[in-house]
Amino acid sequence: MNVTAEWGGILMSVGWFILIYMVLVISFYTILLVISLFHLRKTYGLDDWEPYEELLHLHQTKPVSILVPAYNESVGIMATVRSLLSIEYPEYEIIIINDGSTDDSMEKLVESFQLVKIKWVIREQLHTQPVKGVYQSRLYKNLLVIDKENGGKADALNAGINVSNYPYFCSIDGDSVLERTAFLKVMKPIVESDGEVIASGGSIRIANGCEIESGEIVKVGLSRSPLVVMQVIEYLRAFLMGRIGLSRHNLLLIVSGAFGVFSKRWVVDAGGYSHTVGEDMELVVRLHRYVKEQKADKRIVYVPDPVSWTEAPESLKYLRRQRSRWHRGLFESLWIHRRLLFNPKYGSIGMVSMPYFLIIEFFGPVVELMGYVIMILSLFLGGIYLEFAILLFFLSILYGSILSMAAVLLEEWSVRKYPKASDIGRLFAYSLTETLWYRPLTVLWRCEGILDVIRKKRGWGEMARKGVSK
Amino acid sequence: MLIKKIIDNKNRVLIEQYKEEYQLALFQFLHEGVKNESLNDRSPLQIRALVELLAGFSKMFASDDIQERLQGFAEEHFQTFIFSQLRHSRWSIRMNALYWIQDFKMKSMVEPLRELHASKNVSKAEEIQLLKIAVMFEEEDLVARLIEPKHKLTEFEYSLLLHTLRKEQFGPLVHVFEELPEVMRFALIDSIGARNRMEHVPFLQRLLEDGSTELKVRALKAVVGMEFYLDVERLSVHLRADSWQERLMAIKACEYIRSQQLTPYLTELMSDPSFYVRSQAAQSLLRLENGKDVLREIAVHAEDGYARDMAEQWLERGAVS
């Protein structure tokens, strides 16, 4: 096949652009990897209990309100509540927010925990959809349930904040299972810093494949489904590699909605959760923004150890929906706070974090997609283009597979959550195949998210849950 | 990597086995002082198993006899091992060694600990752990080391250290109160309350009279912690203070005083501008003998809608919990 010189020139320019972009991105990730490696290695093997024991007995350990927004979470909600009732923490309350569920979540809760409707003065610091009633459990004094009209996850969380009694709150998803000591660990930086740390996020791991009984992880295992295994690797990469590096320099823009603790005062002052599909990221960006505007010296940190286990989608259909939604959420946060981009007034958040999320996280899939197209085209065009395609292919192997493999190594060298050697072997083997199938898929889904932004698509889309607990 | 994991997993199984084997013999030794031959084994994995076992036991028994035997056993068997761990290049290994030294109260380690503290690269977490051990051993230069630490300590970190102080160690610090860093002052007041140091009540009372607002709030909090009785006349000053935090703490101090004299103050505070104060006032009223009647009266007749709502809420909440 012959190509015109003009067409060849365009192809080469795009190719060079992608090449330079990927080299930059790989360099950035490698820096994050090195920072994480040093940090995780330093703490590897540290006694699991001694550093936290005192927190259990000191009254300086601040009480926490745990907010669990629930919309049709009938399958998973009971396990979540049970896991929360058994956490090790001196003082906490659990607030389930039934966000107008149409299933039997509310009935199940009322029956299982002997809920009684009580008069509750709601301090409406954040505006929400009307609350139909506040219930308190007869069995557990610290368990409250808010029954409200449907308003979305952000609205539910804001209602929870209004009802909460304590100075710190934690938002967790209705299908999550927390490790017993997760709260002590995630609260440690907040307590130790005398409040300089205003938000702290823990790690999220995938529960599919683990044995969970009555809301407690009995045995950590790895799912047989390749799609789930790839997500496990992806989470390791995102949490162990990305967030440690960013957190070290107060550059963190995401405290995952599935498990994070926030100072109520700062969140209320910053305006609470907003109605976006990526409300967790949006809140963190707003907090950073608010802190900078107030000229306060506050930090948002990530703690690698405390783990919340959550159910990952097992089918392509739901995974696709989740990924395009996440990408839409990323866009919304970046768009709402576009003023921060390259704005030196906002320090490293404006000059490093926001550009990182825009250039690498948001536009990354577009550039990657272009790379795949060039690779395929080059197969037909031959000659110099083929060599170029091979170069791009090796870079994408480095970008996808090798960095993911490094994340698995990080896990094994530091956190060691997977006890079986065979599980680590499988994670390792799967990570090598990432570039060949999983990464192109996620790239397509994320690009679909960009199209959804252009098409102005809204809402979450339905999500099927099997429930992770026995 | 996989081979290492397989070996590590096997070693862990072995350590657990050793722990099971040694458990009874070690327990008997600690309890009765009868030493079993089997406890003299010295392979690295066996020592590791013994260290882990002993660390577990150290938290279970408080008796002096047992603690003494435990300390003696650690000094005899673990010195070389723990010393090597203390010199390890990895931070986590050094920290674990410091935890063990604290658990086993190993006095023989005082010198190596001083060396570690003097080293340039000692991390903040290590310094705190070293200070905790210094508090435990009541070292002479303790006050100086606390006042001028190598890393800037937060109030919480000072609290951690001060909570373990003995009665006699508090006195010198209270004496030099004015010279202490601000966060250390707060932590000291807090510890007096948390550890119920009644001998320092006059000091707290002095702070309540002429301390700054923040010091007054802290002193009230300590009074609450000690469940110390402040007379109504004294409390009334704080119940009408400008700062809502001071009013809130004063209400908390009312909770142990079931005096009818408090009713008018608490009733007035049911209309306080602060939500937290209103809520706390309702809780305190609920504890008074005729509190429920007062709350019912407020719920029905109060002019202030916020007070009515709050009274109703606590009448119901009190009934559930």
Image (spheres, coloured by chain):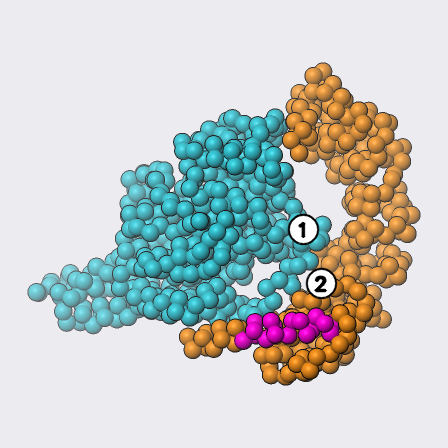
Chain colours: A cyan, B orange
The one of A119 and A1 positioned closer to us in this rendering: A119
Q: Which element is circle 2 on?
A: helix
User: Is B23 within the magenta?
Assistant: yes
Compared across the picture, whether B210 is left or right of B268 comes to: right
Which corner quadrant holds the N terminus of chain A? bottom left
> Foreground: A268 or A314?
A314
Q: Tell me if A39 is positioned left or right of A429 in this view.
A: right
* Residue topped by disc 1: A61
- Residue sitting farthest toward the left: A1
Picture coordinates of residue A437 (x, y %)? Answer: 27, 61
Q: Give the residue drawn at x 52%, y 28%.
A: A131
Protein chain holding label 2: B
Q: How packed is label 2: few (under 14 Cα within 10 Å), some, or many (20 or more)?
A: few
**Vertical position of residue B16 compared to residue A443: above or below:** below
Please state if B53 lies on the left or on the right of B241 as rendered: left
Most common secondary structure along the magenta stretch: helix
Q: CA distance from mark 1 to mark 2?
A: 23 Å
Secondary structure state at the residue bearing disc 1: loop
Q: Is residue B298 magenta?
A: no
x, y (%) of residue A182? 56, 54
Residue flagged by tag 2: what amino acid is it?
Answer: Met
Q: Which kind of residue does numbered mark 1 sit on?
A: Thr
The residue segment tinted magenta is B14-30
The answer to which image quadrant residue B234 occupies is top right
- Can residue A291 be seen from the camera position used here? no
